[in-house]
Amino acid sequence: MQCVDSWSTFNAVDYQHDEHWVHLIVYHLVWTPKRRKSVLVNAVATECRALIERKCSERHWEILELAIQPDHIHLFVRVQPNISASEVVQECKGLSSRDLRLHHKHLLRLPSFVDSFVFRVNGGQRFSSHDRSLRRGTDGTVVLKAYRYRLYPSKPQQRLLDATRKTARRWYDDCLAQRKAAFELVGWSVPYTYQLRQVKTRKAESPFAAGVHSHVLQLVRTDLERAFHAFFRRVKAGEQPGYPRFKGRNRFSSFGSRSMATAFVWTDGG
């Protein structure tokens, strides 16, 4: 197991004041090209920086620091309290990968432009406007510390993780197929909550889904919902829409859970 410390300090005067909240939400995101190839150079690096800056400007995210190295990207960004780190990653990685591969054909030799792994440090605090005494610490600063862990699963655990990933991918494709067919045949947009309620039925009918926690399948449907939100936002902005795609075997590399308690069980010596 490996552990990496990352420290950042923010002065309390940088807190943002909204109608009901005082907040400082920042994310430090690091991602790399596939196989960590040193392709972010010259025109590719310049265009990548412009794409990320444009997307952050459109979403009203403040870039505190953006460093593009030949084999990785550092993005230090401040966002609104309702924006998750995964949403920032999805917006910036998706935009830069799609556009750069379109304009620079040598990037098409990579199976995908960016790696699926992202190192993320979440930081910041959010307080009620009534808790004025909590706005700044005793020394006027907020100190953030994050740990990065690398886990080495056993072979049975690897098989279980891979089986869960495959089940999640099939559920994603089935939800997308149902929504696509319903709209094309009868003009009905399948509601998000309707498919969430189908998780229980899926677990009862599918032997593969029976052993997967409901939170995993619910989060898969949430990811599809975000993909449709991004699609309709691009349509409204007059951009190239990019309808959500079915996930092939090589295009679904991870799954998530809504809480650590339902994702892993930690045991001593195990």
Image: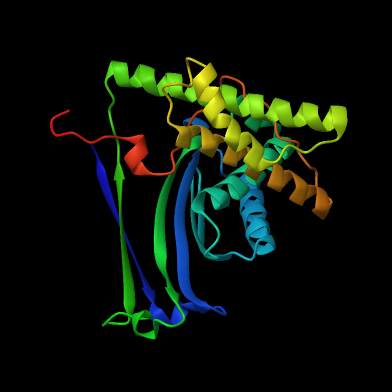
Q: Is residue 60 left or right of residue 34?
A: right
Residue 117 lies in quadrant:
top left
Reply above or below: 68 against 164.
Answer: below
Q: Measured from the top left, where is residue 201 in percent x and y? A: 56, 25
Q: Is residue 27 left or right of residue 190?
A: left
Q: Which of these two is toward me, 67 or 128? A: 128
Q: Measured from the top left, where is residue 74 in percent x and y? A: 47, 53
Q: Is residue 180 left or right of residue 193?
A: right
Q: Which of these two is toward me, 26 or 204? A: 204
| Residue 198 visible (yes or no) | yes
Q: Measured from the top left, where is residue 41 in percent x and y? A: 57, 45
Q: Quadrant of the N terminus?
A: top left
Q: Quadrant of the C terminus?
A: top left
- The residue at 69%/61% (across/down) is 58
Reply above or below: 134 against 218.
Answer: below
Q: Measured from the top left, where is residue 95 in percent x and y? A: 66, 45
- The residue at 39%/85% (across/down) is 132
Residue 39 lies in quadrant:
top right
